Image (cartoon, rainbow, N blue to C red):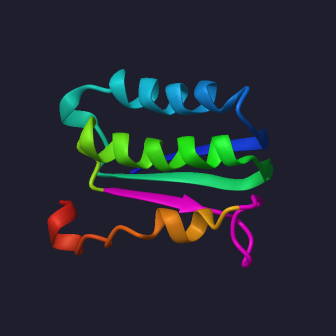
Amino acid sequence: VRVVQFQGHLFFGNVSVFSDGVKELIRNTKLDERPYVIIIDFTLVLGIDSSAAQAIMKLRDSLTNQFGIKLSIFCPGKAEGFPCEINLYEQLNSRPIPHHENIL
């Protein structure tokens, strides 16, 4: 399991640094040591614009398709969801969660 936390505002100007940083973190991990699960913690994020929200959805897909991470958990930190205009919580949860036997 790997946990990544971001703080501040995510917007079109810095979301690529965030996404690329997460991918680089995984890419620089030996194949046999790559996590099965990644938790991305947004509890300290104050705002997310629509460009950043779309990039976060693409990041979720990249973690699965490019790196083979079977479960990505995105923690909004607030009961009402992520601090953005689109329903990022619903978008990120649109893919079924794999059963625990399929993760390991």
Residue 22 shown in magenta:
no
Compare residues 53 and 78 and report the one nearer the observer.
Answer: 53
37 lies left or right of 13: left
| The magenta segment | 71-85
Which percent across, then down, holds residue 39? 49, 54
Against 38, is 14 above or below? above
Residue at point 69%, 48% (across, down):
50
Compare residues 2 and 89 and report the one nearer the observer.
Answer: 89
Residue at point 35%, 67% (across, down):
95
Q: Quadrant of the image for the C terminus?
A: bottom left
Which percent across, then down, holds residue 24? 44, 23
Compare residues 101 and 83 and report the one nearer the observer.
Answer: 83
Against 94, is 48 above or below? above
Using the rendered view, name the quadrant where residue 70 is placed.
bottom left
Which percent across, then down, holds residue 98? 25, 70
Against 96, is 82 above or below? above
Residue 79 shown in magenta:
yes
Using the rendered view, name the quadrant where residue 5 is placed.
top right
Which percent across, then down, holds residue 21? 54, 26
Using the rendered view, name the quadrant where residue 100 is placed.
bottom left
Q: Which secondary structure class fits the magenta region best?
A: loop
